[in-house]
Image (tube, helix red, strand yellow):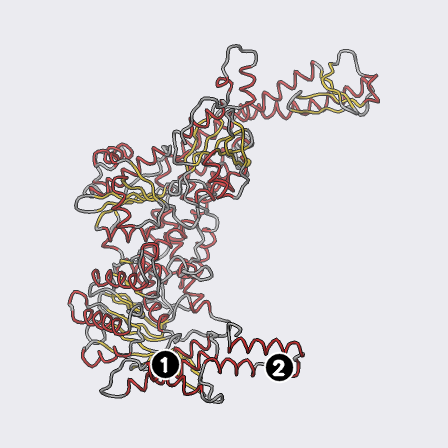
Amino acid sequence: MAKDEKGLTPMMKQFFSMKAKHPDALLLFRCGDFYETYCDDAIETSKILGITLTKRNNGAASGDEMAGFPHHALDTYLPKLVRAGKRVAICDQLEDPKKKREEIKGKRGLTAMDKMVKRGITELVTPGVAMGDNVLNYKENNFLAAVHFGKGACGVSFLDISTGEFLTGEGSFDYVEKLIGNFAPKEVLYNRERKQDFLKYFGSRICTFELDEWVFTEQTARQKLLKHFKTKNLKGFGTDHLHNGIVAAGAIMQYLEITQHTNISHITSLARIEEEKYVRLDRFTIRSLELVAPMHDEGTSLLNVLDRTVTPMGGRMLRRWMVFPLKDVKTINERLDVVDYFFREPDFRICVDEQFHRVGDLERIISRVAAGRVSPREVVQLKNALMALQPVKSACSSTNNEVLKRIGEQINLCESLRERIENEIHPDPPQLVAKGDVIADGFNSELDELRAIRTGGKQYLIEIQQKEIEQTGITSLKVGFNNVFGYYLEVRNTFRNKVPADWIRKQTLAQAERYITPELKEYEAKILGADEKILALEAKLFAELVQDMQTFIPQIQINANLIAHVDCLLSFAKTAEAQRYVRPVIDEENVIDIRQGRHPVIETQLPIGEQYVPNDVLLDSEHQQIMIITGPNMAGKSALLRQTALIVLLAQAGSFVPAESARIGLVDKIFTRVGASDNISLGESTFMVEMTEAANILNNVTPRSLVLFDELGRGTSTYDGISIAWAIVEHLHEQPRARARTLFATHYHELNEMEKIFKRIRNYNVAVQEQNGRVIFIRKLQRGGSEHSFGIHVAEIAGMPPSIVKRAGVVLRELEADNSQVGTNTRPSAKKLEQSREGVQLSFYQLNDPVLQQIRDEILGLDINNLTPMDALNRLNDIKRIVSPNGA
């Protein structure tokens, strides 16, 4: 948005000079009581916010577009801009306009720019770098990510500046893509020279920002990190050997500098992402299992069902646990032990739950302390949180659970900080320091004296008013104040003749006049001076407290993490109690044995009075490695597959599970290929997406994996689909490195033959009953394959016109008759189908022709008793159009 400065007003020159610093960001330019945007920024801002776009004359021949909003509405509009993926530079006035006017009054030789209020960019807010609650989701991390394309591996790093969490790792492009899917960053940084590589491996659906190539060098990155952490190396963080990960982490630090976020003392460590500790879940699996977000707006995710956390930190951690289940039996059982303890000790549970309701967002509050942006109310909330931790620490320390005992020992009550806040800050302060009454009475003697002057001075003004009334006899006299004249005496016109000669008239109104006296002005100076001094002193004292609070950042961050951990486990216990979950058995064996398992989400969405039908699933590596599940559409095959994966995932996250009993042999990866989708924007058909996802599974599967295939091969011809499905199942059975526990739901009944050939394949079907030509879904898994899909019945209950349903039945019978003849060509006989259509057209009463069927249905649907003559003619005309659509 480069602009020729010739002919521009001083303010527009100032605008373009600020815009040049961040040309890729929308610039909110403070003008008095408004934030204004100009030119291209205004056009874009008006579209996103839905505000009016106008024009201004900037002194040039043509006008510039402008759009703005009141400055107090920033909290309303800024989140909309950031959530639209925009970077926003906030340019504020750095001087008080009133003081500026007084400063330049009477000075000569000043240029127009000298008279301008100084402005500067005070904050650059981007989707990945945000600190304010107005932008952040309190139960979701706001990660910024950076990707570095190294020689042998790809480095990646994640930072949530609002909490201080900073992580790094490296690996294959597939591994980094998985991490990006799991962490769901709001913005990703990468080297602009590697744009094509980024698009190739990670796509274009995420918000990105390009940085210069020099940022992505190991020397630059290490220097940034070592300078920030004040260490000689990164060995203490366990990340020193992650060369590519370090480059990515350094790029993030550089970006913070670019966006003017330099108060980051709350970023106290750089943690390594330990791949070997967690179950691998790719983005397809996270999406199809609806772990953290439903695929449809009206849907419900697993997180929605499980999340009964009380604290924002707990909510954020629970989201992370859902996409990072554990692979260590000991750690999983430690979590399960705590959940179990909550069941056995209701008093302990009630105590913890009550105190957690008082904690608030401890993690983000202490981050704002580091940034110097914490409010007085948040400081008091921090004190309340520390007070709430006292009974929690005591309760945890007195348990007989080792995990809770350790947590009790690690909680730091920060008593000296809590006492300082209690002594220094008013119990109910305003949100802003500038509002006053932040510092507690009795803490600072100078402040107490100034407050006494302010209070006493105002009382003295009342005494002046009473004295002047008595001396002048003006009974309606009153003392008032405004920003122009300060304090004044107001006299109504009926008493004007009683005004003493030494009073000085300052303003004439329609019904009164206003005067000042030397005595009044003397006390005005004292009172106003006290107000200004009070605000300045309160700001100074508050800033000193915030500065001293920064030494407690590491301890409070540890407290926040411990609270989040316990809150997640408490949430598991609450859900388990409400939904009748049981504790699973976790071991290293290769067996998944679920008895009477239920889908944790679907069972909560059923109509009142309807019960979810539970089912058993047994998978092992010796006898029943692959279950081929056939059965009708809508019978519950997909739900069965998903519930198995969700039960395994819940168990390895440390939660109880919806089942009568469950034994879970550790799973290292969960893969799903379910549902139909396409990616038309990249030229990928439904079948291409299906094959890409299947290839990803087969290239990464191990014998400890859990694999779910639902309707594989449906995107191509029948024989192609059967062939691919057969080959994949055979590969999973025969290839030692791919011998995963597998559920394979299909409508290809030909796959039932595989049980006769392969020893670890078993056929199952989801049972139905046919009664009087209707299909009843029993939703019970039983041994043996099925030969019917009942798709026509599903079409009927979906509301398909009856004529189409009946014709489909005729075609199906013809096709089945053809395929039942041994030794004949099994291709559908088009001639026979045509004959069946033509033959029935000879007889109106056979009605196998779709047109005749539709005519019959129209006639049968007539209500003769209530049909008017005009209605009859109209319906007859409708029937004629069925026979002759063109009106012939």
Residue ID at (24%, 62%): 697
Q: Earlier in the sequence, mark 2 or mark 1?
A: 1
Callout 2: SS: loop
Amino acid marked by disc 2: Asp
In this rendering, would 471 be left or right of 212?
right
| Residue 131: image location, x then y, percent | 42, 40
Q: Amino acid at mark 1?
A: Ala
Identity of the residue furthest to the top in this view: 108
| Residue situated furthest front in the rendering | 888
Q: Quadrant of residue 367?
A: top left
Q: Nearer the viewer, residue 346 or 767?
A: 767
Residue tagged by mark 1? 767
Element on which disc 1 rests? strand
Residue 127: quarter of image: top left
Q: Quadrant of the N terminus?
A: top left
In the picture, the disc for residue 863 is 2
Q: Is residue 702 above or below residue 11?
A: below
Q: Is residue 695 found left or right of 10 in the rendered image?
A: left
> In the rendered image of this protein, does residue 193 appear above or below residue 632?
above
Residue 387, placed above or below residue 734 = above
Viewer-side label of 2, 1: 2
* Circle 2 Cα neighbour tier, 10 Å, few/some/many (<14 / 14–19 / ≥20): few
Q: Residue at x 27, y 37 (%)?
A: 250
In which image quadrant can residue 516 be found?
top right
Against 400, residue 243 (above or below) is above
